[in-house]
């Protein structure tokens, strides 16, 4: 399974949609908006096109390398005409990776800036190159991939991001109901699996008892 290399956190299908409202922290005069690039609860399901498997990816915010992060783009299209702002003050804060974006003054930059100000847009997404991962596999669960070392190359304005908590800071977010339901179902599955293991153990112990009883009866018969 190939999980090392360049990827984005741009959601293309079956995307979770968070309930976000307009932020009061936007500096309209300075054309500056504070963003959360990676939230503390950023784990989510991804699809591996090489293997056809679904896995859970999570980014360790302390593993992010920020040296090359300079520019804010549109929709991860990393070309000159799509550069609409500069990224400033990127840092880890309360288990989240945050920054500020100062928007350009050209027509395209102004258009996207107004959409964030008006609340039409709220999400952002990072483009990053993965260097190192820790893979954890458990029976009955999706493979968990923790990305521990990665270079963030760019930040983009997107319609819907992969990380539900990544977007304008100061905007209240709620975990989508579908994820709450998934967590509830996962707990049920784990409980069922635990009960099955317990039953199997009881059957095994019962079988051992029957074997012992048979041996005892056999010994009595021989006497």
Image: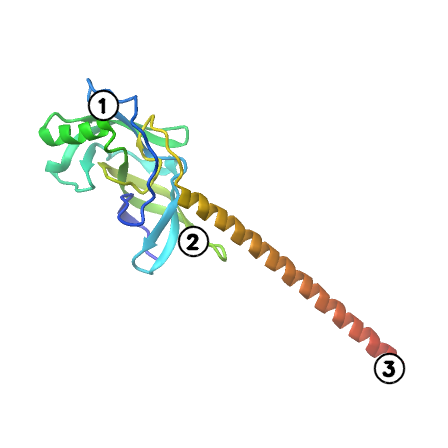
Task: Kindly report the distance in space between the C-alpha atoms of the residues bearing marks 3 and 2.
Answer: 55 Å
Please state the horizontal and vertical placement of residue 76, each as a whole percent of the image: 20, 41
Graded by Cα atoms within 10 Å as few (under 14), some (14 to 19) or many (20 or more), the crowding at tag 1 reads many
Colouring scheme, one of rainbow, by chain, secondary structure, one colour: rainbow
Please state the horizontal and vertical placement of residue 120, each as a whole percent of the image: 23, 32
Name which quarter of the figure residue 98 lies in: top left
Graded by Cα atoms within 10 Å as few (under 14), some (14 to 19) or many (20 or more), the crowding at tag 2 reads some
The residue beneath circle 3 is: 222
* Residue occupying image coordinates x 49% and y 57%: 140
* Residue occupying image coordinates x 28% and y 45%: 11
Report the quarter where the N terminus lies.
bottom left
Graded by Cα atoms within 10 Å as few (under 14), some (14 to 19) or many (20 or more), the crowding at tag 3 reads few
Task: Kindly report the distance in space between the C-alpha atoms of the residues bearing marks 1 and 2.
Answer: 39 Å
The residue beneath circle 1 is: 32
Report the quarter where the C terminus lies.
bottom right
* 103 sits left or right of 217 in the view: left
Q: Is residue 101 above or below residue 222?
A: above
Whether pointer 3 and pointer 1 mark residues with C-beta atoms closer than 8 Å, the reply is: no
Please state the horizontal and vertical placement of residue 31, each as a whole percent of the image: 19, 22
Sequence-first disc among 3 and 1: 1
Please state the horizontal and vertical placement of residue 21, each as a whole percent of the image: 31, 29
* Residue occupying image coordinates x 37% and y 38%: 63
Viewer-closest of 162 and 62: 162
Sequence-first disc among 3 and 2: 2
Task: Kindly report the distance in space between the C-alpha atoms of the residues bearing marks 3 and 1.
Answer: 92 Å
Viewer-closest of 18 and 113: 18
The residue beneath circle 2 is: 143
């Amino acid at each position: 399974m190939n999980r090392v290399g360049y990827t984005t956190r741009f959601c293309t299908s079956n995307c979770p949609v968070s309930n976000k409202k307009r932020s009061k922290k936007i500096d309209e005069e300075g054309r500056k908006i504070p963003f959360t690039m990676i939230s503390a609860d950023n784990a989510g399901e991804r699809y591996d096109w090489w293997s056809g498997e679904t896995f859970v990816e999570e980014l360790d915010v302390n593993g992010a390398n920020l040296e090359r992060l300079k520019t804010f783009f549109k929709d991860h299209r990393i070309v000159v005409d799509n550069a609409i702002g500069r990224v400033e003050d990127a840092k880890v804060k309360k288990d989240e990776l945050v920054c500020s974006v100062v928007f350009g003054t050209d027509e395209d930059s102004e258009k996207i800036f107004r959409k964030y100000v008006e609340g039409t847009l709220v999400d952002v997404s990072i483009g990053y190159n993965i260097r190192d991962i820790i893979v954890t596999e458990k029976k009955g669960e999706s493979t968990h991939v923790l990305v521990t070392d990665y270079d963030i190359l760019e930040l983009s304005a997107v319609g819907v991001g992969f990380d539900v908590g990544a977007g304008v800071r100061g905007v209240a977010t709620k975990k989508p109901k579908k994820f709450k339901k998934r967590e509830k179902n996962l707990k049920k599955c784990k409980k069922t699996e635990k009960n099955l293991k317990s039953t199997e153990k009881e059957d095994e112990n019962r079988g051992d008892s029957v074997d012992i009883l048979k041996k005892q009866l056999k010994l009595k018969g021989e006497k």
